[in-house]
Image: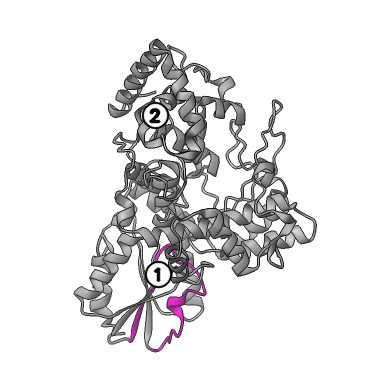
Amino acid sequence: MAGIRNLVIVLGDQLDRGLSALDDYDPEQDVVWMAENQTEATHVWCHKKRLVLFFAAMRHHRDDLCARGYRVWYHALDVDGRRDSGVDFVAILTTAVRELGPKRLVMTECGDYRVQRVLADCAKHHDLPLQVRPDRHFYCRLEAFNDWADARGSLTLEYFYRWMRRTEHILMVGDQPEGGQWNFDKQNRQTFGRDGPGELPPLRRFRPDAITRAVIDMVAARFDGHPGHIESFDLPVTPEEARTALRDFIDHRLALFGDYQDALWTDMPFAYHSRLSAALNLHLIGPRECVDAAIAAYESGKAPLNSVEGYIRQLLGWREFVRGLYWHEMPAYAGRNALRAELPVPRGYWDGDTDMACVADAMRNVVDNGYAHHIQRLMVLGLFALVAGVHPYRFHEWHMAMYLDAIDWASLPNSLGMSQFGDGGLLGTKPYCASGNYINKMSNYCKHCRFDYKQASGDKACPITTLYWDFLDRNLEAFRDNRRMVFQVKNLERKRADTELMAAIRRQARTLRQQIEDGERI
């Protein structure tokens, strides 16, 4: 095979049969390069189920490519590591370059700035041209996003979303939105009430085949010390399985997704959410297929507009927006820390060991499934980290480690920006902070918790409530001129009028923050 034309790089989050890097592929002249590697598996301390998902999906994609006539140079991790040709991208790619002697490297736009730079530097080291092609998986090309962003003084999701709806003519009647309004947020904040959610539709699960079972055995042997569980692995790892999961969501959960997308309940890991984000971010299924299926459900009367619009907003709005913002702002974005937060991620975020009922329940989902739906992420785990003062990039690294769907382009804006306000309001115009009262309103957690969500000081004080007031107090000057924080600032000023209470809150917050700093249980 020496002296080939193109060595075509396919990364673990690019498992798309129509990948642009494969355009003009010639089996007589070109070879596809894919690699599992130790460094990417341990760059952050990855959840075991995340490792199984990536490696199993990659191996299935390799076999699919081979069956369709592609020649694939594939580096697989084995159980004991004795056959590894290197630990990172550079070492493994160097081995392939020396064996195959390509004239050019070809790839599709990467999902991680760091990996893109590593591959570019490797190509330069070998004096090889590197052609980077657009990623057609997304609706909005990066050049189009940059043009849109550069023409505005500030980046606002709502305006981007409307622009995308008009551009793609999705849920539009002429130049106006279907139903006469752009979003249905007010209809999509229902709670389950005191009786709870009742019987939920069962989730479509997938039995591991021989390829996936081999990966499970490898991960169990090689990454035994990593967090999470893999015994119940049941995720889609092929495009066919991803489409089956999409049909199941459309048929059984989309209709009520809108109403209850923000609702929380004990031992309810998935509710009416699709659990498709990991398959989407690995490119096993595309956003157009998901959007088209949701629109078809609306047009056929199977799902109401508030649910369909809410789902489409996540795909066409939020997902495209954070990807564009990531590449528009990198690499400086990763270093932002507007509130100068410095604490480590709480110890309980790795194992779920805490007396806080809301955090414990959300973390059971993360440890067991490598998943939490967006309200668990933002308004439970993200909220506690925010008000405590966790360093935003450390929180992003934890997010990358523990969530199956975490790719850098998606994780960094969502965790550092949206969740932890590390970008100072570039992504979200205000921090998503709240007291324990929000958790009580949206869930049943507080009924089963040893802490009292109403109390900010004392033995039974809710840590979220204590730290919420301390967070506002610590960062008052940063929020004073924020028009969306007027209500919170006024409430804080009233709280400060009671100097004795405020002093008690500050003392208790210092103790909690020191416990997090010292890695103690809360």
Which quadrant is the N terminus positioned in? bottom left
- Residue hosting label 2: 471
From the viewer's perspective, tell me whether residue 338 is left or right of residue 250: left
Q: Amino acid at mark 2?
A: Phe
Q: Nearer the viewer, residue 123 or 234?
A: 123
Asked if residue 327 is positioned above or below residue 412 in the image, the reply reads below
Neighbor class of circle 1 (other Cα within 10 Å; few <14, some 14-19, many 20+) is some
Q: Amino acid at mark 1?
A: Glu
Q: Which mark is residue 109?
A: 1
Q: Could you tell me which residue is drawn at 49 percent across and 58 percent down?
A: 321
- Residue 404 percent coordinates (x, y): 46, 50
Element type at mark 2? helix
| Residue 338 sits in quarter | top left
Element type at mark 1? loop
Magenta span has 161? no
Residue 355 in view of the camera: no
Discs 2/1, front: 2
Task: Specify the segment rendered in magenta.
Answer: 5-28
